Image (cartoon, helix red, strand yellow):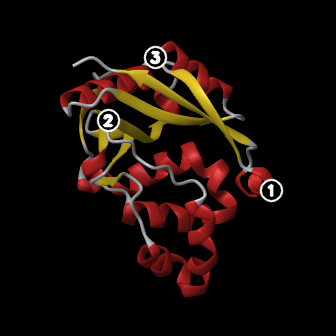
Amino acid sequence: MTQVRLAPGFPKAERSTAARLYWQAFGAKLARTLGPTNRAEAFFADCLDPAFALGATDGGRLVGLAGFKTAEGALTGGGWGDLARHYGQLGALWRAPLLSVLDRPVAPDTLLMDGLCVDATQRGRGLGTRLLSAVKDLAAAKGLTRVRLDVIDSNPRARALYERSGFVPCGTSDLGILAPIFGFRSATRMEACVTR
């Protein structure tokens, strides 16, 4: 078995793998808005921005991804034009407002997580913890003081990982009538302090 390596971004040749990993991690909550799988993966392969990610590779194969969002951009930075290209004008018209419900503003002193994805073959081996640690190091290198993420109520396993990695809950948001569309009722905002 080779050693999993962490590095900024991900190789251009791995865009479809990055999209597959992202969809595996977030497809359950985005299926009604961006499905079916083949269309969603094509959308993400086109729109994921490696400049806002840390990639984990095993023998050159992408097996994990930690995305983030700053004032300069985000891993999942697709806009109206990207939606229209993959879903048509009419499809973009109703998808864009729904997706905007999930958008979170970036605080000046905070690195906002924009997805943590680990391939099924790597789960339970500490890769998620390594990626979170690397994200904290990145935030510190950028002179930021906190890392923020949001975890949905239907994912207690992820929340446990975040708590073990030093993230503490600091607020909850409720989806209200949109809960059936996204498959979860609420999300807990969690933050971890970073040291420079």
| SS type, badge 3 | loop
- Of circles 3 and 1, which is in front? 1
Q: Earlier in the sequence, mark 1 or mark 2?
A: 2
| Disc on res. 165 | 3
Amino acid tagged 3? Ser
Q: Position of residue 19 (x, y in %)?
A: 44, 54
**Residue farthest to the front, as pictured:** 108
8 vs 188, left or right, is left
Can you tell which mark lies on residue 109? 2
Q: Which mark is residue 177?
A: 1
Between discs 3 and 1, the one toward the N terminus: 3
Left/right placement of residue 176 relative to residue 68 reads: right
Relative to 189, is 191 on the left or the right? left
Find numbered disc 1 in the image and state the secondary structure of the residue it sits on: helix
At horizontal 54% and vertical 63% (from top left) the residue drawn is 40
Horizontally, residue 60 falls left or right of residue 93, namely left
